[in-house]
């Protein structure tokens, strides 16, 4: 059967009875193995909670729009480290089990790992964009079982064909940070390739996973990038296209930045004290935006419960947005959002040579605890990836 483009496939699906929405309880999986190898955690805590097993439950297709992907490489992100310690547990539990059917701890054994590059093994009945054997990449939402396993199940609209120019380990360095940068720069900041050319963008935390991706995206669209990072990352960020680099480690970064022309957009992936001075670097009354990725959203629900935590977050964002709006700038929180269509566009930029993955270190599947220790040490220069299948050179 000829494959449909993503748009044509969705059009056909939406025209179908039921509007293409998943049919609860319909299993489209063929009979197969019931267990797989994975790194799991059975409780939240330090690195010692990571456990290798060959008996993790094999993922099942529960909705017709889902696909099972054989994981060849996985990527780790700071959120995996935080989730290992229990960060976001309340909100993510509610997302996984909205009716609270399972007892507390029903998320265990939990599999971490937010990026996947691999091969489609099986497709649900309504999946028309992919077929078994397709090489794909995806960001695995934090409320789903992760990619530190032989197989992962995802919605077809979270998956995208992998760039042909990247190996699986390189591809596994991209989806989560790309989806976060895309959601922030495109959806929250309104940037696109046609309106970016005269924009001055400040990226705080420029040498990390999100920062290294965001620099390349803004540069591909012709914007001007000022990158804040430590001095020993200057070569990296300049190599990715940053026009101006400011070292935060030698102090008084706010004073140094105040001497520069004002910005149209600030992407802050550091947070904390930066929030105090960074919005003041924006052009006032010109639609300029400060967007921070470091938000108290999940921390609030962890501490106060879902309802009170959400109220607290709503109050905080409203207060801050109003305060900054009165000074002529917009204040926003940025979030990761899974999106296969966004990854389709990123694939084109990667294959056109506009964006390259930045892999800080690659680990084998047996070295997953060491990969987490690497994340724990901080001072990221790009991404930590894990080859799940063999040496990962596919
Ligand atoms: N809200 C969301 O949905 C969402 C999604 C993705 C990420 N995030 C958050 O965004 C943050 C960044 O993510 P990431 O994947 O890019 O992390 P990462 O790869 O660990 O990078 C963090 C970077 O920040 C740099 N840094 C630390 N302190 C700094 C400072 N004062 N000024 C400038 N740079 C500084 C570090 O560089 P040095 O080594 O030089 O210190 C490091 O390169 C994390 O907190 C993550 O949890 C949030």
Image (tube, rainbow, N blue to C red):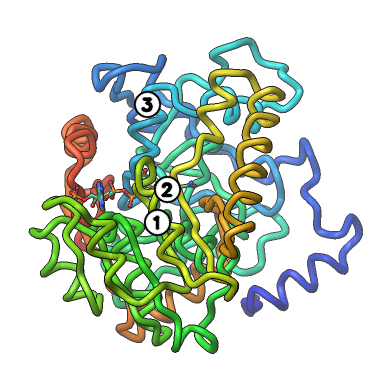
Residue closest to the far top: 103
Question: Is 249 above or below relative to 345?
Answer: above
Relative side of 98 to 309, left or right: right
Q: Are marks 1 and 2 in contact (CB under 8 Å)?
A: yes
* Ligand 1 is within 8 Å of the C-beta of the residue at disc 2: no
Measured as percent of width and height from the top left, residue 178 is found at: 42, 62
Residue 386 higher or lower than 197, as above or below: above
Q: Secondary structure at mark 3?
A: helix
Distance between the alpha carbons at the discs numbered 2 and 3: 27 Å
Instruction: Report whether residue 241 is seen.
Output: no
Instruction: Using the rendered view, name the quadrant where residue 338 is placed.
Output: bottom right
Label of residue 278 in the image? 1
Which residue is depicted at the point 32% across and 44% down?
76
Mark 3, other Cα within 10 Å: few <14 / some 14–19 / many ≥20: many
Residue 226 on image: x %, y %:
29, 71
The residue labelled by disc 3 is: 84
First-in-chain label (3 vs 1): 3
| Quadrant in the picture for the C terminus | bottom left
Where the N terminus falls, by quadrant?
A: bottom right
Residue at point 19% right, 61% down? 393
**Looking at the picture, how far across and down is residue 194, in whole percent?**
54, 89
Query: What SS does tag 1 mark?
Result: helix
Helix, strand or loop for disc 2: helix
* Dot 2 crowding, Cα within 10 Å, few <14, some 14–19, many 20+: some
Q: Nearer the viewer, mark 3 or mark 1?
A: 1
Residue 229 location (% of width, % of height): 21, 58
Residue 275, labelled with which disc?
2
Q: Is residue 72 left or right of residue 196?
A: left
* Of residues 73 and 57, the one drawn nearer to the viewer in this rendering: 73
CA separation in Å, label 1 and label 2: 6 Å
Q: Nearer the viewer, residue 223 or 302?
A: 223
Mark number, residue 243: none
């Amino acid at each position: 059967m000829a494959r449909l483009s993503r748009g044509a496939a969705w059009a056909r699906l939406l025209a179908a009875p039921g509007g293409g929405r998943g049919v609860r309880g319909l299993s489209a999986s063929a009979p197969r193995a019931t267990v797989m190898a994975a790194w799991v955690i059975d409780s939240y805590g330090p690195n010692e909670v990571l456990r290798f097993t060959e008996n993790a439950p094999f993922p099942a297709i529960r909705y017709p729009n889902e696909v099972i992907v054989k994981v060849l490489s996985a990527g780790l992100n700071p959120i995996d480290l935080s989730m290992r310690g229990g960060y976001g547990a309340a909100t993510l539990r509610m997302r996984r089990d909205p009716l609270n059917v399972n007892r507390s701890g029903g998320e265990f054994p939990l599999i971490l790992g937010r990026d996947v590059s691999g091969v489609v093994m099986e497709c649900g009945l309504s999946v028309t964009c992919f077929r078994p054997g397709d090489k794909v990449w995806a960001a695995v939402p934090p409320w789903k079982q992760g990619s530190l396993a032989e197989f992962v199940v995802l919605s077809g609209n979270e998956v995208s064909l992998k760039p042909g120019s990247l190996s699986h380990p390189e591809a596994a360095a991209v989806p989560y940070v790309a989806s976060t940068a895309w959601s922030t720069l495109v959806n929250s900041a309104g940037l696109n390739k046609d309106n970016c050319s005269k924009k001055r963008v400040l990226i705080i935390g420029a040498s990390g996973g999100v920062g290294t991706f965001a620099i390349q995206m803004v540069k591909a669209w012709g914007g001007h990038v000022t990158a804040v990072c430590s001095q020993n990352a200057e070569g990296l960020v300049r190599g990715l296209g940053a026009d101006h680099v400011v070292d935060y480690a030698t102090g008084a970064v706010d004073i140094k930045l105040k001497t520069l022309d004002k910005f149209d957009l600030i992407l802050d992936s550091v947070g904390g004290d930066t929030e105090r001075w960074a919005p003041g670097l924006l052009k006032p009354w010109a639609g300029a935006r400060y967007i921070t990725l470091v938000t108290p959203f999940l921390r609030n629900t962890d501490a106060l419960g879902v309802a009170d935590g959400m109220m607290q977050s709503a109050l905080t964002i409203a207060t801050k947005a109003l305060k900054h709006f009165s000074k002529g700038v917009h204040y926003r929180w940025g979030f990761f959002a899974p999106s296969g269509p966004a990854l389709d566009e990123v694939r084109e930029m990667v294959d056109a040579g506009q964006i390259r993955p930045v892999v800080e270190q690659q680990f084998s599947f047996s070295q997953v605890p060491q990969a987490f220790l690497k994340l724990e040490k901080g001072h990221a220069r790009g991404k930590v990836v894990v080859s799940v299948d063999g040496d990962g050179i596919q």
